[in-house]
Image (cartoon, rainbow, N blue to C red):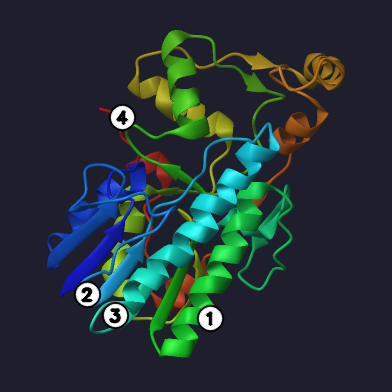
Amino acid sequence: MKFLLTGASGFLGKHILAVLEKEGDVITIGRKEANIVFDFSIGVPALTNVDVVVHCAGKAHSVPKTEVERKDFFKVNVQGTQNILNGLMEAKALPSAFVFISTVAVYGANSGEMISENHALNAEDAYGLSKIEAERLVLDWCKANRIRCTILRLPLLVGRNAPGNLGAMIAGISKGYYVNIAGGEAKKSMVLAQDVANIIPYASRINGIFNLTDGYHPSFSELAFHIAMQLSKKRPVNIPYWIAKPLALIGDIVGSKAPINTQKLNKILTDLTFDDTKAKKELNWKPTPILKGFELV
């Protein structure tokens, strides 16, 4: 089996690469640490024949502050995906399967419980909108060329050396400045990066769109305590709601520089979970609960 993997140097990509190397030959494409070094948001050369494409590369973990930064999401996530597809068309033979790593951000939900793949795609932010467009490009291309298409929609990715919000949480707990807000008891879907990587070879055999979660949906309070225990730190302190609310109102006035505002507070206080029943039935998805499988050391 021959694989083409984009984003192999990223957090999730490194996990996927290690799994695919056990399954066959892997060609990586990316801006660094790849067999084919290229900025795929600008263009890609004609690609060699492969059996399975795993498109993991993309832009995430930032909030655009300018129109230029907003457009960059579409340049990387949409145009970059189109360039990959164009490069594949130049190969002597097309792949038999295409796996696209997407996100639950396409649903545009700030709250909700057990949201399924049938939920409307209501994203309004640049990240979610760009991933919706990229999904449609891949779906249409695979359909037109009779290629199996698997789209995996992921929530917060968990693992050692995680980027983004989880990385910031770990750093905050390590240095003693992370706090839970209003108890931090809202349930949030998460998934181990290693579990996602492990399912890729089997998932590439199945057409469909799938949510992947750990099946438990821990609260931030539970996750923070789990991290603190591993770091031999005290349980993070809690800022009660009656203090957090006025701080959020002040944040509304201060603007983007404030660590919290009403919108952020509401997200912290509400459950946001996703249903992976379809993956369990069709992919034999058997995830590891975050609080059992996430190890920092």
Tell me the number on the disc at residue 95: 3
Q: Residue at x 33, y 51 (%)?
A: 7
Q: Position of residue 291 (x, y in %)?
A: 41, 40
Tell me the number on the disc at residue 50: 2
Tell me the number on the disc at residue 243: none
Q: CA distance from mark 2 to mark 3?
A: 5 Å
Q: Residue at x 31, y 45 (%)?
A: 31
Is residue 204 visible in the rendered image? The answer is no
Horizontal arrangement in the rendering, residue 3 relative to residue 215 (left or right): left
Q: Residue at x 26, y 42 (%)?
A: 32
Q: Nearer the viewer, residue 55 or 296?
A: 55
Q: CA distance from mark 2 to mark 1?
A: 20 Å
The kind of residue on which mark 1 rests is: Asp
Q: Nearer the viewer, residue 264 or 256?
A: 256
For the N terminus, the quadrant is bottom left
How busy is the neighbourhood of tag 1: few (under 14 within 10 Å), some, or many (20 plus)? few
Q: Earlier in the sequence, mark 2 or mark 3?
A: 2
